């Protein structure tokens, strides 16, 4: 029995560290193997030169697989007719423009929130011995740190997935609905995180409200453009 779930990595949020199914993901297993091999060699797997080398190796492997599949089907890749194809440009679509607006708003907010969290962490350390319930205070603070991580993780993934969804010629395509669903779920988690931060520090209202409004506008836009995303079943995640 294959321990990996086919295609699970196509419609996930790429947050392997927090995924309960990463042990059933071929992509996660390959990435772990890549990191372990570089560390065994004394190399930094996050060094840009190493990353580009690995990307080159992956592309070479992909081309070899394509050639092998073509040969098995009796297709000569060298004699295929040249077809002119102009893919749709998602940059011009209002939904992608809104996603980019959200990304930029979130980026500015995250810089401010990071400074606040760092200051609060230092202050919390100083006050911890005189707090009536230090465990509760520390737990609340840790929850805000997690909210920061959620917004940080998704604020670039959301426009990327919307771009992919819009980049398919037929917006009713299976892949478009899957990509749209990932963006929608990321928005939902981000909205929850923003609401928690708002209740933690209402002084951030002027920063948070524009983000919440833009995020909700994006969710409604996804519903309008890709209604099939609500019924899309992601391999491994949805039953």
Image (cartoon, rainbow, N blue to C red):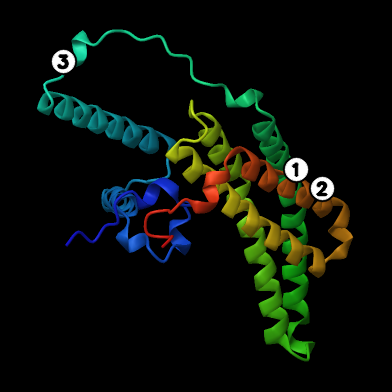
For the residues labelled 3 and 2, the Cα–Cα distance comes to: 54 Å
Seen in the picture, residue 208 relative to 200 is either above or below; the reply is above
Query: Mark 3 sits on what residue?
Result: 76
Image spot of residue 145 (x, y percent): 66, 65
Query: Which secondary structure, mark 1?
Result: helix
Please name the residue shown 59% across and 26% down the image.
90
Q: Left or right: 144 with respect to 172?
A: right
Please name the residue shown 48% across and 14% down the image.
86
Which image quadrant: the N terminus? bottom left
Query: Mark 1 sits on what residue?
Result: 105
Seen in the picture, residue 159 relative to 199 is either above or below; the reply is above
Which image quadrant: the C terminus? bottom left
* Tag in front: 2 or 1: 2
Q: Left or right: 233 with respect to 80?
A: right
Contact, mark 2 vs mark 1 (Cβ under 8 Å): yes
Query: Which secondary structure, mark 2?
Result: helix
Give the mark nearest the N terminus, 2 or 1.
Answer: 1
**In the drawing, what numbered circle is on residue 210?**
2
Image spot of residue 131 (x, y percent): 78, 87
For the residues labelled 1 and 3, the Cα–Cα distance comes to: 49 Å
Contact, mark 3 vs mark 2 (Cβ under 8 Å): no
Q: Left or right: 29 with respect to 117?
A: left
Q: Badge 3, how many Cα within 10 Å: few under 14, some, many 20+?
A: few
Give the mark nearest the N terminus, 3 or 2.
Answer: 3
Seen in the picture, residue 4 relative to 88 is either above or below; the reply is below
Q: Badge 1, how many Cα within 10 Å: few under 14, some, many 20+?
A: some
* Tag in front: 1 or 3: 3
**129 or 52, which lies in front?**
52
């Amino acid at each position: 029995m294959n321990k990996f779930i086919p295609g699970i990595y196509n419609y996930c949020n790429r947050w392997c560290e927090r995924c309960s199914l990463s042990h059933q993901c071929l992509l996660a297993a390959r990435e772990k193997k890549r990191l372990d091999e570089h560390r065994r060699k004394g190399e930094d797997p996050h060094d840009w030169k190493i990353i580009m080398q690995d990307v080159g190796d992956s592309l070479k492997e992909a081309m070899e697989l394509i050639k092998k599949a073509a040969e098995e089907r009796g297709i000569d890749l060298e004699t295929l007719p040249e077809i002119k194809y102009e893919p749709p440009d998602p940059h011009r679509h209002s939904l992608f423009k809104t996603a980019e607006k959200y990304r930029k708003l979130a980026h500015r907010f995250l810089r401010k929130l990071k400074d606040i969290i760092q200051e609060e962490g230092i202050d919390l350390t100083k006050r911890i011995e005189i707090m009536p319930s230090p465990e509760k205070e520390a737990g609340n603070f840790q929850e805000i740190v997690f909210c920061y991580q959620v917004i940080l993780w998704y604020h670039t993934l959301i426009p990327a997935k919307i771009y992919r969804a819009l980049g398919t010629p037929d917006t009713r395509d299976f892949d478009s609905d899957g990509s749209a669903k990932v963006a929608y779920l990321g928005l939902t988690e981000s909205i929850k995180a923003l609401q928690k931060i708002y209740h933690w520090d209402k002084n951030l209202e002027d920063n948070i409200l524009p983000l919440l409004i833009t995020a909700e506008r994006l969710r409604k836009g996804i519903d309008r453009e890709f209604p099939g995303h609500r019924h899309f079943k992601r391999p491994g995640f949805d039953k």
